[in-house]
Image (tube, rainbow, N blue to C red):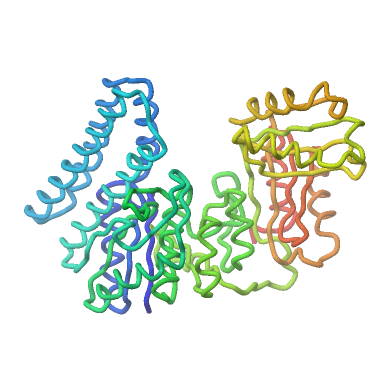
Amino acid sequence: MKIVMKFGGSSLADGSRILRCGSIIERYKQNHSLIVVVSAMDDVTDKLLVLTELAKNGNREAIREHLEVLRAIHIEATNIIKSDNLRAAAQEEVSKLLTELEKVMTASTLLKEVTPRTRDLILSYGERLSSILLEHTLKDLRVDCLRLQGGEAGILTDEAFGEATPLFEASKSRIRSKLNPLLEQNIIPVVTGFIGETQNREITTLGRGGSDLTATLIAAAVKADEVWLWTDVDGIMTADPKLIPNAKTVPQISYAEAREMTALGAKAIHPRAIEPIAEEGIPVRVKNTFAEENAGTLITSTTQLKEGEVVKALALVKDVGLITVSGAGMVGKLGTAAKIFDILSKSGVNILMISQSISESNISVVVNRSKLHKAVTALELALLGKGVVSEVHAEDDVSVVAAIGAGMQGTPGVAARIFGAVAKRGVNIRMIAQGSSELSISFVVKEKDALTALKAIHDDLNLGG
């Protein structure tokens, strides 16, 4: 088969894990044609984000300390390379790249400014560094490979720095011309995820889930048989196993179910990454780097349901806030909802969930808690005292619980069973939302009750098996 393998940050967290990834690639290359996509080492992107903030404050000493930490992490990881020559080459390339980063940080610190374009450049160093480590580890295992940045592999994007969108058709053509000749020579491309480039060869990043998107775009371009996402869990789970110890792996889900799950924070493929493979019908496997014998979760275009199965998984979304905009003047007033959404959009606040009463006298929205104060301030300044809205009420102690599954479509009584299970535990529901697709039901509860609600549904629906 032709397989695109993407390794996440947790799979590349240190030298021993990078060696494990290299060994997986070495084994599968015997019978398959492989393309490898890498994320940055675990927590490295967060460390680079900290550097951007330190540069804005002109904090040279702290930047120097953070760069030394990055250097130590990556140099330490090279110790798993047995060949003295390859280890030295990897260390030299890591040092060279970090010297480049240091120059970028020096310029940004002097200016006390980090533009979106510069921020993308800084963040790109995470994947560029990890790709050096994996490339030299593979060569140490006598695997023929070639390291490529996203742009070099053909990922062409618009100029929306920080959340760039690939130009799909142009990218596919470029990817084929770059990667197919390598595959024909049995050379494994090692591609940096998360990174693309504009037509002017400026580095861009693809935003959250960017490495997943890199992998699926490449898969669509070369018409791969499957995409394998290697992570630190056994696939998509019925719930977060850290919260629900008896959570089980979901063996199969559809693209539509995966979108719902991952949009709600379930650890799997990012929703943006589904589009390229959905068009081609390419399956995705989510597998555990540390338990590769496990089947993981298969994501396909079709829905497979067991008899009596209505809900496949639960998600808990924390760190959110609930805003309720109320007023008798809202009843029958055209454009009120549009105005609320426009205010939040212009304030840079993303809406996670929406609900409106049929009376039209109030609208509730859920936003990220970090944006709650900003959102409330913007709404109060724009709406209060205008004769339409009388109150903007905020709650910062809530969480969202969601149930997802294609078996909910057209099945009577699903909501009653879910809410009944929650009610038996004495948990009050503050807000409810369900799309017409019936693939998910989301509701808001007080943060202190969220885990109780999650456990109640998981137990009542027997998701633990």
The residue drawn where x is 33% and y is 45% is 124
Please state the horizontal and vertical placement of residue 287, each as a whole percent of the image: 44, 62
Residue 335: tell me if it is visible: yes
State the image quarter where residue 99 is shown: top left
The residue drawn where x is 41% and y is 66% is 170
Residue 457 located left or right of residue 195: right
Q: Residue furthest left?
A: 85
Residue 356 located left or right of residue 50: right
In which quadrant is the C terminus drawn? bottom right
The residue drawn where x is 38% and y is 38% is 119
In which quadrant is the N terminus drawn? bottom left
Please state the horizontal and vertical placement of residue 223, each as a whole percent of the image: 42, 76
Q: Look at the picture and state if 126 lies above or below 185.
A: above
Between 399 and 422, the residue placed more toward the observer is 399
Please state the horizontal and vertical placement of residue 272, each as a whole percent of the image: 53, 57
Q: Residue furthest front?
A: 200
Q: Look at the picture and state if 198 lies above or below 453.
A: below
Q: Look at the picture and state if 399 lies above or below 391.
A: below
Please state the horizontal and vertical placement of residue 263, each as a whole percent of the image: 60, 52
Between 158 and 258, the residue placed more toward the observer is 158
State the image quarter where residue 392 is shown: top right
Residue 426: tell me if it is visible: no
Residue 264 located left or right of residue 157: right
Counting every numbered tag in the picture gives 0
State the image quarter where residue 447 is shown: top right
Between 453 and 230, the residue placed more toward the observer is 230
